[in-house]
Image (cartoon, grey):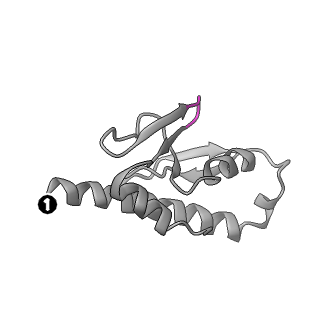
Amino acid sequence: MRKSDWRLAEATNETIFREMNEWTRDDEGGRADASRGRDIYLCECGDGTCTAPILLTLTEYEAVRSEPTRFAIALDHENPEIDSVLVEYERYTVVDKSFGQASQIARASDPRR
């Protein structure tokens, strides 16, 4: 696989995990309650085999999802070739795809668009 193909595959994997988190959020009626504590989400990193859970409140998740190019990932799961770390918290990291094809894939596949 060419290097550029690998980057596209990672960007696509991140959007798949994001979509799975959206489905989970939609299916669990309790998540609509902002006073609820932390919920388990899947790490949205580019590793297609990653199953790391991350804990976020609904407010934290919504802050990440406010931009279609942002993803919540487990600590140290970023790939500097396609991820720009925006902020690293105690429980998770927020990365952005602000350039190139990874950004285009993230925007085009945003389930909230």
Note whether 77 is above or below 16 in the view shown. Answer: above
> On the rendered image, what quadrant is the C terminus found in?
bottom right
Q: Is residue 36 magenta?
A: no
Task: Tell me which segment is drawn in magenta.
Answer: 88-92
Q: Which residue is mark 1?
A: 1
Rendering coords of residue 56 (x, y %): 66, 44
Which amino acid is tagged 1? Met
**Foreground pick, 108 / 35:** 108
8 horizontally vs 43: left or right: left
**Foreground pick, 67 / 21:** 67
Label 1 secondary element: loop
Q: Give the residue displayed 30% in from the left and 42% down from the top.
A: 81
16 horizontally vs 38: left or right: left
**Foreground pick, 16 / 109:** 109
Badge 1: how crowded within 10 Å, few (<14), some, or many (20+)? Answer: few
Confirm whether residue 72 shows in the render: yes
